[in-house]
Structure formats: C-alpha cells, structure tokens
Amino acid sequence: MRSWVTVGALALAATVVGPAVVHTTASAHAISAPTQVGGGKAGKVTPTPAPTPTPTSSTGAAPLVQGTLVETVAYGRHVRQRMDVWYQPDELKRPGVFLVHGGWWSSGDKKYMTEVSRSYAEQGYVVFNINYRLSGDASWPAPRTDTFGAIATARRHAARWSFDPNNYVVVGFSAGGHLATAVGTYKNGLPGLRGVVGISPVISPLTAYTEGIGTLDPNKRKLRDSAIKLAGGCEPTGKCARVWTSMEVPWHASRGDAPMLIVHSSDEFVSAEHSRQLKEHLQQVGVPVTVLTEQGIEHSAPLYRLPGVAEQVQQWVAEKLFSLGR
C-alpha cells in the first residue's frame, strides 16, 4: 500500500475549512454498509490500554467530501463506545486525526465535532471522531481507557480505512483536551502518535479543583464539581489521592511523550495555568510544547472558531504528520 505522502497528496493539507457546530442524525445502533455522499507510571489506575474488538459499523448521516465514506463503528460494548470514521477507500495510507469532544466529562457528543471532522477529511486525513463513557457512566479512568480503545481499534483495522497506523494526532476540546493530553503522556509514548492538540484543555483537575473554591465564577465552580464527579465523587484527599494523581496530566510527563500544541483564551475559565504546568513538566524531559493564547474569554469550540486559530492548529498538525521523511 502506497503512502499518501509519496503520491503528492500533501497539497490537500493546504485546504482550511472553518468549523461550526452541526448536528448529525446517525444512529449508533443501526448496522449497515458505509454511506458515500457526493461520490506505566506511578499513580496510574489502569496499567494497560483497552482491548481492540472487531468493529461493527452503521451509516453516517453528515454530507461528506466527494469520495469520502463514513462509518459509525463500535469499538466496545457500551453505547458510548462508538466513533465516526471518515475515510477515502483507496490504496493510500493516510495520516489520521482523532477528535475528542468536550462537555465537563459528563456530557457532550461526537455529533458536535461534525464540522471539525469534515474540515480534516477535506484535507485528506482519515478522521476518527470518538465518543467515550461519561462520568455518569463510569468514573476515571474509563474515558481515558475508551480513548485508548478507539485508537487501538483504528490501528488494528487500519487497512479497512486506508489509515497509516504509525502516523496520527489526537485533538481534544476542553474535557476532551484532558483526555487527549492524558493519552499523550501515558507511559513513555504511544506507537504512532505524532502530536497532541488541546483546545482549552483541562490539563490539571487539581488546578480546576483549587480554582473552583470560593470563586464567584459559575463555570469554575461547575468545573470543580465535574472533576470530583470524574474522580468517582471523592475529593483529592485520603483514599482518593491515587485517582486524582492518575488524572493529573503534568505529573506523567516523560521523554517519549508526543509534542503538544495547547490553545487557551487569556480570560477563559480554564486558566492558562493548566498549560503552564504541563509545559514546565514536558520541557524538563525534552518534549516540545507550543502554547498559544488568544485574547478574550472564548472556550473550546468558540475559541477554535476565532479567526486564524483553526488554521494554526491545522498547520501544526500537518507539520507533525509530514515530518517523517518519507
């Protein structure tokens, strides 16, 4: 199978499409053919990633790039263990982009990432837009385990989607940014992971917990409560210290971790302190980190939609996925 890069498809990465929120009506339970439109560190609670079951698929409903197929794939038994796969059924091996939605770890859905998925699919990437168990379904580390499960399933069945399993990035928004960076700092690096992007990522649940004490900001108070719920309903003391340690991304930095790009607004409720901590820990072990700060209060998807932000993220992603010297 030829590499996408070797046939000159890098030019596709110059395409930039501004994201917007669009709802998809795809059912995760229907089983049918794909649809074509237009043609080991201390403190870890889970020692290993999730298993990789053979995926089952259903139809996707979003209008796609010409020649692109979409499948809604089950990577586990729970109803939330689903991902939409946007791919071109050809002989190339294309780089992959995994998208992880936000929502306080307790809400949100992959359908809100439809236009972001489309923008990367139009650039020629294979896109894996994932759902995961929420904190009301299971506490930490369930959502991280699910993110591993989605990635492992995609890599195991790479040929099915013309995907290069050794060349992908993970992009997460808000709480999804926490999961993306947690995956990026797991053990000493995941095979094939070339970069991690966090848009308003909640990198440090402990910082969220502290900043939510005594504040008048309702979002900071809600984020504190959401972190407690993610931890199984307990605060970071006594018997719960271990799970909070596992959730704390900066403490798991190691030399083999993937490079990271982090974007915050200057005055949003997920403070840039989260990024400062992660940058400090990753730089100590020699992992490059780029932090972008935009003026204003926009958080997550609204931040990504600010003029120039998506373009900078897409350029960074392209640099990471085309730096292998092929």
Image (cartoon, helix red, strand yellow):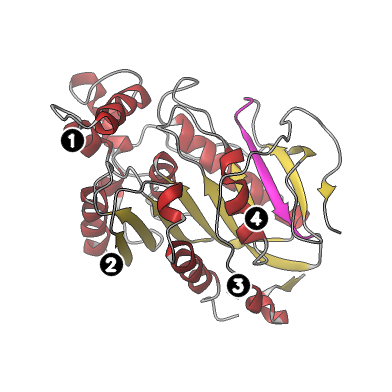
Between residue 138 and residue 59, name the one nearer to us: 59
Residue 186 - label: none
Q: Is residue 29 left or right of residue 151?
A: right
Label pair 4/2, CB-CB below 8 angstroms: no
Task: List x then y, in percent, for residue 138.
Answer: 47, 22
Distance between mark 4 and mark 2 Cα atoms: 34 Å
Q: How many marks?
A: 4
Question: What amino acid is labelled 4 in the image?
Answer: Arg
Label pair 1/4, CB-CB below 8 angstroms: no
Q: Secondary structure at mark 3?
A: helix
Please state, as top left, top right, bottom left or bottom right, where the N terminus lies in the image: bottom right
- Mark 3 vs mark 1: which is more N-terminal? 3
Say if 47 sits above or below 37 in the image.
above
Asked whether the viewer can see residue 160, the reply is: yes
- Mark 3 vs mark 2: which is more N-terminal? 3
Residue that lies at the very extreme toward the left in this rendered image: 214
The residue under label 4 is 118
Q: Secondary structure at mark 4?
A: helix
The residue under label 2 is 286
Please state, as top left, top right, bottom left or bottom right, where the C terminus lies in the image: bottom right
Residue range corresponding to the magenta coloring: 78-88
Q: Secondary structure at mark 1?
A: helix
Distance between mark 4 and mark 3 Cα atoms: 13 Å
Picture quadrant of residue 131: top right
Question: What amino acid is labelled 1 in the image?
Answer: Glu
The residue under label 3 is 13
The residue under label 1 is 211
Give the foreground label among 2 and 1: 1
Task: List x then y, in percent, for residue 87.
Answer: 73, 56
Task: List x then y, in percent, for residue 64.
Answer: 74, 54
Question: What amino acid is labelled 2 in the image?
Answer: Gly
